[in-house]
Amino acid sequence: MALHEPTVFITRHIPEEALRIIRSAADVRVWPEELPPSPEELRRECEGVDGLYCMLTDRIDGALLDATPRLKVISTMSVGYDHIDVSACRERGILLGHTPGVLDETTADLAFALILASGRRIAEADRFVRAGKWETWSPMFMTGQEVHGATLGIVGIGRIGQAVARRARGFGMRLLYHSRSPKPESEGLGAEYRSMDDLLRESDFVSLHVPLTEETRGLIGARELAVMKPTAHLINTARGPVVDQRALSDALARGQIAGAGIDVFEMEPVSIEEPLLALENVTVLPHIGSATVATRTKMARMAADNLVAGLQGKPMPHPI
Ligand code: DGY
């Protein structure tokens, strides 16, 4: 590919071992700040570089690519790539890589943590104790929804959805799933296929595991929430815009559903003014589905391998 030593811009500090991989093949500049570069800063930094190592916080669109004609390889340290205009990259012959597989179990752990947290009111109870409100034990105090034996509806039965299903079996849960078409292999996990409405109607917990696409944007809105049981919980570790956030806070405030566990938001970071944050029956997390040291390190390395392969004109191990 490039006859000169390729140049690379990395939009955030990454683990040293991933940085070493890239440094062995390119001249590297790392964005020095804690917060991501603004679109203008990103454009400026990408002028004249051959490769970009980015995060899901960086918007990669046609305008950026038009301003950075030398850019030939983009590697995102994420499995999701809804922040990248893939067709704009394809039109310009830019190679794209991402990090599938390595974060499935870790994200499933967090989805399950939210199922337990929402069902058993863990965050609410923690706030209660810290606020000095705990006065006594009483029969129906802080009672929640049982997780063992409950019905879990998994929307999207890809790798992460299946990993959640395996955990749920250990809790003796009844498993339903919905995907664009029935997936016979999921029956091996003991999960039964349902239409979206039947899944919403029958589930005690609904956990979302679909990528964000035009098809899944707003998948859960006021109509879908109205179909759910008043005792049910919605868990979202996928992408914020899959759920209509306003409809969700209305449904939770009215007691139309019992609770929600949310790791992802329509806009991230979520505003402190967001009505969801004022509700006791919502557990909120700052997009940490894959946030373990081991998994983030694997993702960083995988993204580095993709980038270097692309720069060297070799097939990327994990292309988009
Ligand atoms: C991803 O990789 O897409 C997750 O949302 C963050 O790990």
Image (spheres, rainbow, N blue to C red):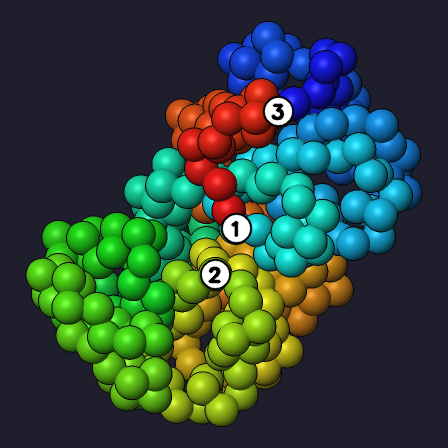
Q: Position of residue 272 (x, y in %)?
A: 73, 58
Residue under pointer 3 = 311
Label 3 is placed on what type of residue?
Leu
Q: Quadrant of residue 50?
A: top right
Q: Position of residue 216 (x, y in %)?
A: 50, 73
Asked whether residue 186 is in view, the answer is: yes
Label 1 crowding class (10 Å Cα cut-off): few <14, some 14-19, many 20+? some
Q: Quadrant for the N terminus, please.
A: top right
Residue contact between numbered discs 3 and 2, judged by CB atoms under 8 Å: no
Q: Residue at x 75, y 35 (%)?
A: 71
Structural distance between the alpha carbons of marks 1 and 3: 22 Å
Asked whether residue 229 is in view, the answer is: no
Structural distance between the alpha carbons of marks 2 and 1: 7 Å
**Which label's residue is closer to the chain start, 2 or 1?**
1
Asked if the beta carbon under badge 1 is closer than 8 A to the nearest atom of ligand 1, the reply is yes
Q: Position of residue 194 (x, y in %)?
A: 24, 82
Residue contact between numbered discs 2 and 1, judged by CB atoms under 8 Å: yes
Q: Residue at x 30, y 68 (%)?
A: 154
* 76 left or right, relative to 228: right
Q: Residue at x 53, y 63 (%)?
A: 212
Label 1 is placed on what type of residue?
Gly
Q: Which mark is residue 211?
A: 2
Q: Residue at x 42, y 81 (%)?
A: 257
Residue under pointer 1 = 80
**Which label's residue is closer to the chain start, 1 or 3?**
1
**Which label's residue is closer to the chain start, 3 or 2?**
2
Q: Which mark is residue 300?
A: none
Observer-nearest of 283 and 226: 226
Q: Secondary structure at mark 2?
A: loop
Residue contact between numbered discs 1 and 3, judged by CB atoms under 8 Å: no
